[in-house]
Image (cartoon, grey):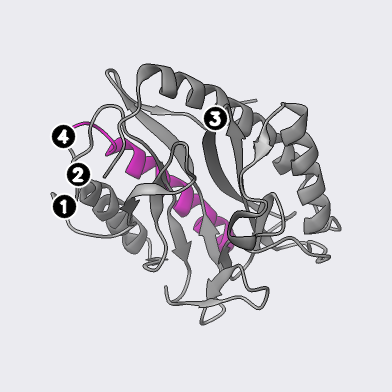
Amino acid sequence: MISIKTKQEIAIMVEGGKILAKILKQLISRVEPGITTKELDRVAEALIFSYNARPAFKGYDGFPAVLCTSINEQVVHSAPSNYRLKQGDIISLDIGLIWQKYFADMAVTVPVGKCDPETLRLIKVTKKALKRGIKKARQGNTFGDIGNTIQRYVESQGFNVVRDLCGHGIGKDLHQEPQIMNYGKRHTGPKIRQGMVFCLEPMVTIGDYKLKKSDDGHGFETKDGSLSAHFEHQMAITPTGCQVLTELEKT
């Protein structure tokens, strides 16, 4: 069953989303050649505690850190390590927190220094796919409408959407119903209703969309070793439309 949040619950989740976006913005500014992903994780943990929030991921299904740091062919859920970022890498920063018992969750993919044009295009397309999905997140549409829109746009750009992983509902649990695929048919799946809160997260690959488990036991990566990008926003369906709760503040 898909839970419907009250105005009061959504108000709390708005606060949590704003805090998380501020934290992620600061993390993005720390991404540069030479920093290790463990260092980024330590920064993330300190920032979460500085806002009197709690990490969402640490200990979740045995995950050892507060930040998922997926590099290049790694798609999602990779654990931080002593790996030092190199010029030309791309990294997905996926982070969550708990604010007054409610979860917030978001992700971005950023280049490390200068990257080649096709890699930058992958990032741009994935980010735009999320924006297109958000535009379909309105009352009366279905979750299939969202997935279809994301898939059609990504494939029109010559890339692929990951099939094995998906977006999700969110609230007092990190993962709730529904599962929101990044592909599918129009007018299928549950209808979107006021009070729903969920995360859309396109995961896009330059090559084949098939995945394998990473050596760290937590992450997933492309089977063919092709690059992957990942963006995620959390949103609520309100009387006035779709409100993105994790919008990054513009500088």
Mark 1 = which residue? 186
Q: Give percent across and percent down for residue 173.
A: 47, 43
Depicted 23 relative to depicted 201: above or below? above
User: In the rendered structure, which segment of residues is drawn in magenta?
Assistant: 116-139
Find residue 142 and name its label: 2
> In which quadrant is the N terminus drawn?
top left
**Element type where label 1 sits in the image:** loop
Tally the marks: 4
Q: Give percent across and percent down for residue 106.
A: 54, 43
Residue occupying image coordinates x 41% and y 33%? 235
Of mark 4 and mark 3, the one earlier in the sequence is: 3
Of mark 4 and mark 1, the one earlier in the sequence is: 4
Residue occupying image coordinates x 53% and y 54%? 123
Residue occupying image coordinates x 55% and y 72%? 221
Is residue 123 on the magenta stretch? yes
Q: Give percent across and percent down for residue 143.
A: 25, 47
For residue 55, side relative to residue 126 (left or right): right
Q: Do the residues labelled 2 and 1 touch (CB within 8 Å)?
A: yes
Q: Which amino acid does label 4 sit on?
A: Gly
Q: How far apart are marks 2 and 4 (CA)?
A: 7 Å
Q: What residue type is labelled 1?
A: Arg
Kindly report the secondary structure that dominates the magenta region of the rendered protein: helix
Mark 3 = which residue? 17
Mark 4 = which residue? 140
Q: Which amino acid does label 3 sit on?
A: Gly
